[in-house]
Image (cartoon, rainbow, N blue to C red):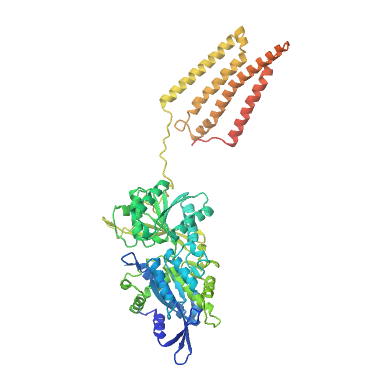
């Protein structure tokens, strides 16, 4: 723990003042020769690292970026000495003539300061960069990568995920060791659709390159991997333009979707808090029904924070989830070795050297809790970006030619692959972006830490409940939702169904009316049968009177059948009643109509015969034919409908 493991960096810095440095454009390497003998000493590749060491108007130090700086310095040192203890391929750099140094710049998470520093760096006469690492925010990387691409410098990020950066016409030398938003969206959609069975998802995203492309990536991933999923998106202004009314309006639109699952894509603790407080006020957070998940920018948002118990923030943040590309998991040898090696940096010499390189107040790195535990979720990706840049540079000069221009360097970057903490680092041969399916992803559940929480203040702890490996999600722990249980909530509000069953009085009244109809119909049948030989009854044709009465009886029986529901019968009984109702009503009406039609048809035959002064005998068989055809057609239609499209009780 006491040895200064960044010794190669400080030694090279001291050596620089004793040598002659020459750069021959378009090469991005500084060639060092002995001042007296002109003998070759080494070729320097200076890595310009752009991180958000401070955030906000008051430029508050952001500790995760200091951790990342330490990891990148470690990567540069391991490349210099050929230490393959974490990435085995680094051992091949022992004989590499290129040595690496680092220089850090504070982006403040803003485009303007970042571009200003990048322009000043490129315009230097000495100590110009070999490659750029960073930035964190996509909105910063986009203008920077236009500049670095035009000037012939490759730029690698372990943070920026905007899919816009895949456009090689705009950003020809930009690559990344983290998947793009389009790539990140695939495991996220798979988790929601396969693990949580979600078909309705609301997305709240910041209106910038990062948020817009991430939201679009979710839509495209859902279209391919979960075509039944409905995604509704709502945007909020970027941090510099956001207002209370803007947040209020966005939350109102989220509430209007009626969805119970919300995925947030934004950044900044102040914005997270403002959004969650407003969501609580409008009833879509902290109610045990709505569940919030966030993208990678939420990483470390709740670490070491004390929140008042039962406050809106406590209730809203309870059970929130984080879905992100993972830099590794505890218990894996590579990741554990990486963490242990970082802890070795916490010796006076290494910390003093690191402090001298950081452009802002770096007193926090001397705190005993620095990197204990790691707070940056991107630290592995940033470390891997430095390793990719270093391996590619060494492989590009293997033939002894110490000329390394940006395009050549970038081609070797895209070809570099190795096993690391976050999975197999493999970049797309066209875009230079990390392959999402080769990347480790995780879902992190935020729950109350009972050990450090008390009756007045609450602190959250993170629990990794699932890991995405080999294109599938594996659950390692039960996820605890906002209601405090592991039962997966519905993605839509539970409908408060009013069954509106028939009351007893209505049933009795309906049965009474049916009884009256049946009694009258039967009475008419009996009367017709008793007086069938009377002239007036014979003239009315008794067979048709019988048919009309029978049709009325059948129609009347449809009334009690239609009143059957699951309060008086089983689901199977309700299904039978649903299908019987159209049969009874249709056949009853058809018999009545067929009787009237056939009777009219019989009269028509007799009248037409009388016009020709011919005697005609019309038998029942003659008039029953059209009636049978009419009823038969109805029976066929009802039969087909019942077999192919049966009705079911719901």
Residue in the foreground of this view, choosing between 105 and 228: 105
Based on the displayed image, in which of its 4 quarters is residue 632 positioned?
top right
Left or right: where does residue 102 sit relative to residue 584? Answer: left
State whether residue 70 is above or below residue 199: below
Q: Position of residue 176 (x, y in %)?
A: 48, 67
Residue 229 placed where, x, y %?
A: 49, 50
331 or 98, nearer to the observer: 98
Report if residue 473 is visible in the image: no
- Give the residue at x 26% y 55%: 456
In the rendered image, the residue lying farthest to the left is: 456
- Residue shown at 49% from the left, 64% from the top: 165
Which quadrant of the figure has residue 55? bottom left
Q: Position of residue 639 (x, y in %)?
A: 61, 31
Q: Nearer the viewer, residue 272 or 514?
A: 272
- Residue 361: x, y in percent? 31, 72
For this view, does 648 lie left or right of residue 380?
right
Quadrant the N terminus occupies? bottom left
Q: In the rendered view, would you say 97 is above or below 282?
A: below
Q: Residue furthest bottom?
A: 36
Q: Is residue 469 left or right of residue 51?
A: right
């Amino acid at each position: 723990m006491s040895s200064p493991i960044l010794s190669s960096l400080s030694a090279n810095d001291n050596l620089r003042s004793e040598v002659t440095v020459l750069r021959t454009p378009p090469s991005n390497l500084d060639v060092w020769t002995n001042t007296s003998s002109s003998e070759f000493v080494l070729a320097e590749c200076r890595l310009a690292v752009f991180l958000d060491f401070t955030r906000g108007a008051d430029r508050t130090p952001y500790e995760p970026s200091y951790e990342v700086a330490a990891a990148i310095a470690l990567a540069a040192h391991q490349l210099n000495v050929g230490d393959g203890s974490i990435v085995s391929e680094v051992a091949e750099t022992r004989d590499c003539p290129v040595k690496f140094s680092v220089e850090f710049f504070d982006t403040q998470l803003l485009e303007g300061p970042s571009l200003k520093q990048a322009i000043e760096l490129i315009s230097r006469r000495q100590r110009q960069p070999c490659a750029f690492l960073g930035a964190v925010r996509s909105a910063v990387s986009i203008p920077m990568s236009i500049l670095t691409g035009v000037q012939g410098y490759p730029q690698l990020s372990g943070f920026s995920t905007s899919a816009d950066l895949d456009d090689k016409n705009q950003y020809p030398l930009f690559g990344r060791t983290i998947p793009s938003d389009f790539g990140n969206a695939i495991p996220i959609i798979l988790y929601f659709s396969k693990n949580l069975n979600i078909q309705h998802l609301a997305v709240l995203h910041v209106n910038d390159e990062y948020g817009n492309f991430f939201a679009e990536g979710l839509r495209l991933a859902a279209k391919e991997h979960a075509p039944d999923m409905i995604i509704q998106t709502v945007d909020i202004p970027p941090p510099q333009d956001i207002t209370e009314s803007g947040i209020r309006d966005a939350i109102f639109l989220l509430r209007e979707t009626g969805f119970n699952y919300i995925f947030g894509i934004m950044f900044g603790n102040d914005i997270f808090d403002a959004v969650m407080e407003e969501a609580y006020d409008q009833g879509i957070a902290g109610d045990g029904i709505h569940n919030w998940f966030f993208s990678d920018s939420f990483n470390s948002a709740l670490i070491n924070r004390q929140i008042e118990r039962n406050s809106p923030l406590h209730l809203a943040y309870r059970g929130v989830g984080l879905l992100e590309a993972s830099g590794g998991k505890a218990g894996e040898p590579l990741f554990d070795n990486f963490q242990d090696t970082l802890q070795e940096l916490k010796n006076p010499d290494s910390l003093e050297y690191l402090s001298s390189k950081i452009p802002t107040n770096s007193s926090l790195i001397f705190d005993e809790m620095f990197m204990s535990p790691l707070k940056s979720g991107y630290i592995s990706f940033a470390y891997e970006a430095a390793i990719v840049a270093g391996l590619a540079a060494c492989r590009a000069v293997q033939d002894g030619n110490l000329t390394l221009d940006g395009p050549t360097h970038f081609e070797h970057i895209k070809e570099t692959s190795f096993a690391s903490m976050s999975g197999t680092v493999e970049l797309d041969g066209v875009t230079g972006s990390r392959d999402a399916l080769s990347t480790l992803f995780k879902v992190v559940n935020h729950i109350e830490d009972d050990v450090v929480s008390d009756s007045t203040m609450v602190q959250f702890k993170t629990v990794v409940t699932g890991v995405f490996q080999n294109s599938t999600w594996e659950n390692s722990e039960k996820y605890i939702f906002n209601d405090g249980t592991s039962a997966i909530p519905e993605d839509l509000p539970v409908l408060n169904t009013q069954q509106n069953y028939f009351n007893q009085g209505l049933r009795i009244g309906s049965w009474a009316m049916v009884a009256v109809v049946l009694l009258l119909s039967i009475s008419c049948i009996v009367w017709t049968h008793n007086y069938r030989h009377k002239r007036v009854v014979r003239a009315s044709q008794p067979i048709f009177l019988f048919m009309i009465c029978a049709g009325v009886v059948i129609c009347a029986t449809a009334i009690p059948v239609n009143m059957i529901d699951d309060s008086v019968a089983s689901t199977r009984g309700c299904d039978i009643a649903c299908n019987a109702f159209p049969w009874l009503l249709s056949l009853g009406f058809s018999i009545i109509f067929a009787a009237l039609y056939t009777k009219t048809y019989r009269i028509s035959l007799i009248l037409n015969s009388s016009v020709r002064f011919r005697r005609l005998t019309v038998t029942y068989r003659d008039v029953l034919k059209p009636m049978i055809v009419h009823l038969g057609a109805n029976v066929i239609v009802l039969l087909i409908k019942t077999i192919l499209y049966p009705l079911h009780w719901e």
